[in-house]
Image (cartoon, rainbow, N blue to C red):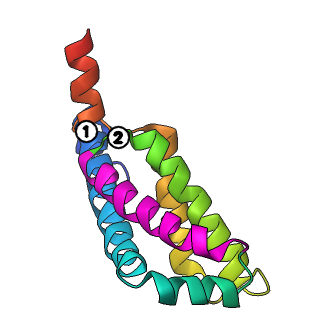
Amino acid sequence: MLINPPQLNKPWATDKALFLLRLVTGAIFLVHGLPKLQNVAMTTAFFTKIGIPMAGFFAPFVGVVEVVGGIALILGLLTRFWAAGLVIDMVVAILAAKGLASFKGYEFELLLAVSSLALFLQGGGRWAVDAMLLKKMK
């Protein structure tokens, strides 16, 4: 019974899981993106320190991607588009800020990258704005 609960075989369970994944992943990106926009100078200095080129451009850009992308994931609006951008954001964060010398230290970014990748591959589910818009267009 615990290995294969019957309720997990139903499509609504997938929609619940995608909704929760969108909600939590989006909220995390939102709360981590806001400080980047609230203190662009500090974000730019950090990006410069870790060797990101054009830090003055990318600091606010990453903040916008994380804030707007986070809100979009919560709503399920253009889910795959924003999820793809957030995967790239986290891969760059891992490579630039953390490095791959050890698994230690980038678990959080890896989890966000994989969560975003799952949303990119699966989409937002039936409870997303995307699904509602597609339904209206038919």
Image quadrant where residue 96 sits: bottom right
Q: Mark 2 belongs to which amino acid?
A: Gly
Q: Position of residue 80 (x, y in %)?
A: 46, 40
Which disc is residue 3 wearing?
A: none
- How many callouts does the rendering have? 2
Residue 102: in magenta span: no
| The C terminus lies in quadrant | top left
Q: CA distance from mark 2 to mark 1?
A: 5 Å
Residue matched to label 1: 128
Our reading of the magenta stretch's main secondary structure is helix
Q: Residue at x 49, y 90 (%)?
A: 42
Q: Residue at x 51, y 78 (%)?
A: 108
Q: Nearer the viewer, residue 41 or 82?
A: 41
Q: Position of residue 32 (x, y in %)?
A: 38, 77
Above or below — where is 132 with respect to 32?
above
Mark 2 touches mark 1? (CB < 8 Å): yes
Image quadrant where residue 137 sits: top left
Q: Position of residue 44 (x, y in %)?
A: 56, 82
Query: Does 127 sit left or right of 111 as displayed?
Result: left
Which residues, given as a range, are shown in magenta?
53-75
Which disc is residue 124 wearing?
A: 2
